[in-house]
Image (cartoon, grey):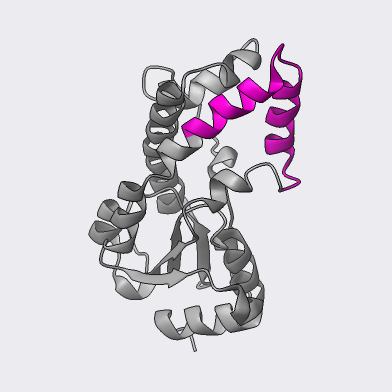
Amino acid sequence: MNLENFYFFSGTSYAGKSTMVHLLAEKYNGIECNENYHDNYEGELDPKEFPALCYTRDLKDWHDFIRRTPEEYAKWIADAKKECEVIELRMLEKMETNGRKVFIDTNICPKTLHKITDRKHVMIMLAPRDMAIRRFFDRPDKEKQFLYQLMMEESDPQAALENYRKGLELICSQESYDEYLNCGFEVNLRDDSLGLEGTMALIEKKLGLN
């Protein structure tokens, strides 16, 4: 797989990965593979190979999704990311770029990225750990607002929200943050004082794009 023109963005939620992927693809007339681009996978998902992804595909009542324990939710997220990695690698292998740069908001883990590319093609973006928990429902994303409405329909909406936030706390653990921080790739810590242009310029410098 030739990934010379592929740039991967990984890290935590609210770190600006999707925004940077969009802006860089726009600036360099590149190809944008933004968050959840693997949803466009053309292959049929086999529940034996992709049980986590098929869980949501085949779900009958989405209230069951939010009623899981925090441990069940965190495990599902981890399993789904591994399955998304498999799909992403299959998609990237077949992608026709015609020499254009490709900017990817990826689920591929740092360990795998070390096997397929180098330090100049990966950017780890990190936000404060509590941000994804505290601001999870602040975004207007249809998926997040859909989940929020489901919780509001529960007999005890506050308990449903608290249960979900406990799952987010497990996902956004210090251990997970430290793994990203020390994974061996370039790291960008969220700094709102830089603004979008300042952040993009810093990332371009670290990746050698300019």
Which residue is at 72% across, 44% downward? 141
Question: For the stretch drawn in magenta, what is the main secondary structure?
Answer: helix
Q: Is residue 53 magenta?
A: no
Judge from the rendering whether residue 61 lies leftward or rightward of residue 72; answer left or right.
right
Which residue is at 57% across, 65% downward? 21
- Specify the quadrant that holds the N terminus: bottom left
> In this rendering, is residue 7 above or below 203?
above
**Figure disc tally:** 0
> In this rendering, is residue 70 above or below 142?
above
Frontmost residue, 146 versus 190? 190
x and y, in percent, of residue 104 in the image: 50, 59
Frontmost residue, 22 versus 16? 16
x and y, in percent, of residue 63 in the image: 65, 15
Judge from the rendering whether residue 148 lies leftward or rightward of residue 209; answer left or right.
right
x and y, in percent, of residue 171 in the image: 42, 39
> In this rendering, is residue 161 above or below 99?
above
Q: Quadrant of residue 161?
A: top right
Q: Residue furthest bottom?
A: 210
Frontmost residue, 19 versus 164? 164
Judge from the rendering whether residue 48 lies leftward or rightward of residue 192; answer left or right.
left
Q: Which residues are magenta?
A: 139-167
Which residue is at 50% across, 60% downward? 127
Frontmost residue, 113 versus 16? 16
Which residue is at 75% across, 23% downward? 152
x and y, in percent, of residue 101 in the image: 51, 71
Whether residue 38 can be seen here: yes
Whether residue 97 can be seen here: no
